[in-house]
């Protein structure tokens, strides 16, 4: 296999795992564990308006699905970046460089997710 082919598999794996992470976080944690009203209360607790909880939930669900399907991945990743950055800044966890923070930074700086996207393959000839 060539380096380009291996790189494309790596980008696919990154895109699928990031999309799955967003989808799982929104559905399992925000909807089923905390419930949307509990997520709204948590947003109020850290000083954010409660409507932002619903917007974050919707953005994570739609963005996660789009990343998994490969639809407009560059724009979706750019749109979801403020959620990751805001979660890191506003998180009530201690401010040490933990493995979680390192993982979040890797996801934020995650590379070009558009190489294997459906939208790119539809607009460019093979």
Image (cartoon, grey):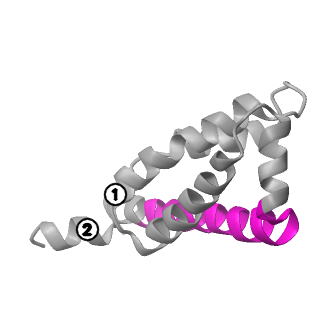
Give the distance between the C-alpha atoms of the residues marked 1 and 2, in whole angstroms.
9 Å
Residue 13 belongs to the span the image colors magenta:
yes
Q: Which residue is located at x 30 percent, y 72 percent?
A: 118
Label 2 crowd bin: few (<14), some (14–19), many (20+), radius 10 Å: some
Q: Identify the residue at horizontal 86%, vertical 62% (top origin).
A: 34
Residue 80, numbered circle: none
Magenta segment, which residues?
9-36
Q: Quadrant of residue 69?
A: bottom left
- Residue 57's spot in the image, x, y percent? 64, 59
Q: Earlier in the sequence, mark 1 or mark 2?
A: 1
Which residue is identified by label 2?
119
Query: Which percent across, then down, holds residue 19?
Result: 56, 64
Outermost residue toward the top? 95
Q: Is residue 9 left or right of residue 86?
A: left
Which residue was labeled with disc 1?
114
Tell me the crowding category of disc 1: few under 14, some 14 to 19, or many 20 or more residues within 10 angstroms, Cα based: many
Contact check, label 1 and label 2, Cβ < 8 Å: yes
Q: Measured from the top left, where is residue 91 in percent x and y?
A: 80, 35
Tell me the residue at 62%/68% (across/down): 20
* Frontmost residue, 4 versus 43: 43
Q: Secondary structure at mark 1?
A: loop
For the N terminus, which image quadrant? bottom left
Instruction: Name the quarter where the C terminus is drawn.
Output: bottom left
Most extreme residue toward the left is 125
User: What residue is rendered at 82% in x and 66% in y?
Assistant: 35
């Amino acid at each position: 296999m060539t380096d380009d082919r291996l790189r494309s598999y790596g980008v696919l794996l990154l895109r699928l795992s990031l999309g799955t992470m967003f989808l799982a976080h929104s559905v399992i944690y925000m909807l089923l564990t905390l419930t949307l009203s509990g997520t709204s209360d948590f947003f109020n607790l850290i000083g954010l308006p409660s409507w932002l909880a619903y917007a974050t939930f919707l953005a994570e669900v739609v963005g996660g699905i789009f990343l998994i399907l490969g639809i407009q991945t560059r724009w979706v990743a750019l749109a979801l970046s403020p959620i990751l950055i805001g979660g890191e800044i506003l998180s009530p966890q201690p401010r040490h460089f933990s493995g979680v923070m390192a993982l979040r930074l890797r996801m934020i700086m995650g590379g070009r997710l558009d190489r294997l996207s459906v939208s790119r393959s539809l607009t460019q000839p093979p």
